[in-house]
Amino acid sequence: MTAARPVQQTEPQPTTGARLVVESLERLGVEVVFGYPGGAIMPVYDALTSARFKHILVRHEQAAAFAADAYARVTGKPGVCLATSGPGATNLITGIANAMMDSVPLVAITGNVSSALMGTDAFQEIDILGATLPMVKHSWIIRDPADIPSIFKQAFHIAASGRPGPVLIDLPKDVQVGAAVASSPFPPDPPGTAQRIDPAQVRRAESAIGAAQRPLLYIGGGVRIAGAVEDVRAFAHKTRIPAVSTLQGLGVLPVDWPTNLGMIGMHGLRAANDAVQACDLLIVLGARFDDRATGRLASFAPNARVVHIDIDAAEIGKLRHADAAITGDVRIVLPQLNPRMPSIDPWIKQCAASKAETAFRYDAPGDGVYAPALLNELSKQAGDAFVAACDVGQHQMWAAQHCEFSSPHAHITSGGLGAMGFGVPAGIGAKLAQPNAHVVTITGDGSFIMNIQELATLRRYKIPLKIVLLDNASLGLVRQWQELFFDRNYSEINLSDNPDFAAVAQAFGIEAFRISKREEVGAGIARLLAAKGPCLAHVLIDAKENVWPLVPPGKSNSEMMHGDSQ
């Protein structure tokens, strides 16, 4: 009997840094990367041809970052964008800042000139690491290709952990072409750290809730990030506490939830803002007292004690003293809260009556298209599969006020940064993340034209994104402010020389049609949602239509201006 031969261990073979980038992304489970090639990232693109994930060629790097951002919001996994050095890298900056402001996990990968040329003002050299330091959680310049796997693993972990956000990896060209064996095996996932919730603060919160006569839930985007939607719904159902939401918290509670009063803030619902001003306890769930939500901070919820729950300790007490300060994941904290509820029936009835009394009306006079009614009907026809990727402007506020969202993942918008041009690339990212949903970009004529080139991306990949373009031939929100606060001195807001957007879309090979009369709305929405491929509805609306209600800048939320909508 012959002895068994020892198994020979195969030595790892050197490979290029570019190939290690692709392999690292594959092992991290990346399915889609959004990018645009160029000289300093070309070795990575050379290696991409054999990648097991899909690369989406956008037509501008800003769109790559926005699309990756929306993909991350829908999936909860880090979105990935890829660009070359110089202008490619700087074109990502707005998207990186957007992800930072809205706490979105994003991994931005940039090429750079070779290490020996860095600091020499070489062609398309830019210090992208320095430029983005204020708007990332962490960043790296990789100096040794052998470090690529471990750094990529760290980057994805940091982007998604705690309060999520963007990270940056900069790859000098010599690192991409250099040969190396990974300096260590692909690292395992770091061990999870159990959150320690301070029991004393939990008891303080329970005591505050038990003593309240007019408690109010203040729901922010942190609930979506934490995956705590069902926990919040269970808590709201158990306690019957009325609730308001920030822009990013919309959809946590359904519109028809009995105690859901809607969005607060500058363009919030009157019943919601009134409830905040009248409450005696504010239970803050993953929100940060943003100025657009609070109005004049000193007069926001003036008679209320505060229970603040947030994963980021830096947010608690930053703008408003918290009587109970609980640092932790909302999903983990809420099940630990078991307050002895007082009788709040009079408060519930007061809020319900206010909600009914101030409900929006959709019977505006005239034959023209009434944008709030159209958006409300759009969300109803799309049903629970509706996902809105909203640009920034009047249409954004109308969508927030009038669309019905089944979950916070159904409402994707640039909140903290307010970046125009977000809508179409965000729609691309959202549709690729959730192909079976009715993903609709809601945009305006000013925002749409900022990234109009992404119609080519829709056509190339046959992405069946639907677009509702509300065209009032002006920069509507700026025009509204100039009307109300600048003595109607209309400065540089006239967009009456807009092109025929339906014809433009058709030139890109995309189905498009126009809606200009109220009687065309129902059939137009049905046509849009039934289209097999990408489709654009160019909707003409009155240039003088304003978003109501409105809290004037610097005023209290109790000082709302009202038009004919309420």
Image (cartoon, rainbow, N blue to C red):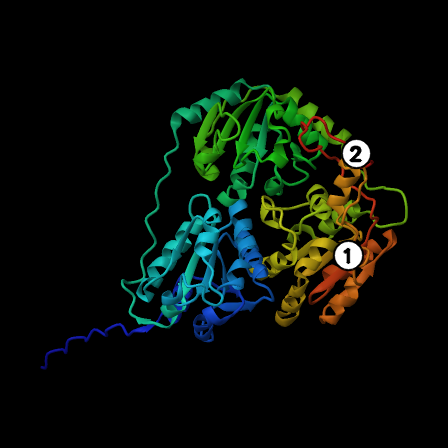
Above or below: residue 285 compared with residue 390: above
Q: Amino acid at mark 1?
A: Ile
Q: Is residue 226 left or right of residue 242?
A: left
Figure quadrant of residue 451: bottom right
Percent from the top left, x then y, of residue 227?
A: 50, 45
Name the quarter where the N terminus is drawn.
Answer: bottom left
Q: Is residue 227 left or right of residue 6?
A: right
Residue position marked by numbered label 1 in the rendering: 525
Figure quadrant of residue 16: bottom left
Q: Amino acid at mark 2?
A: Gln
Above or below: residue 545 compared with residue 359: below
Q: In what element is the residue under mark 2?
A: loop
Where residue 566 is drawn, which disc sits there? 2
Foreground: 472 or 9?
A: 472
Q: Residue at x 77, y 29 (%)?
A: 357
Name the quarter where the C terminus is drawn.
Answer: top right
Instruction: Please say whether residue 237 is visible from this viewpoint.
Output: no
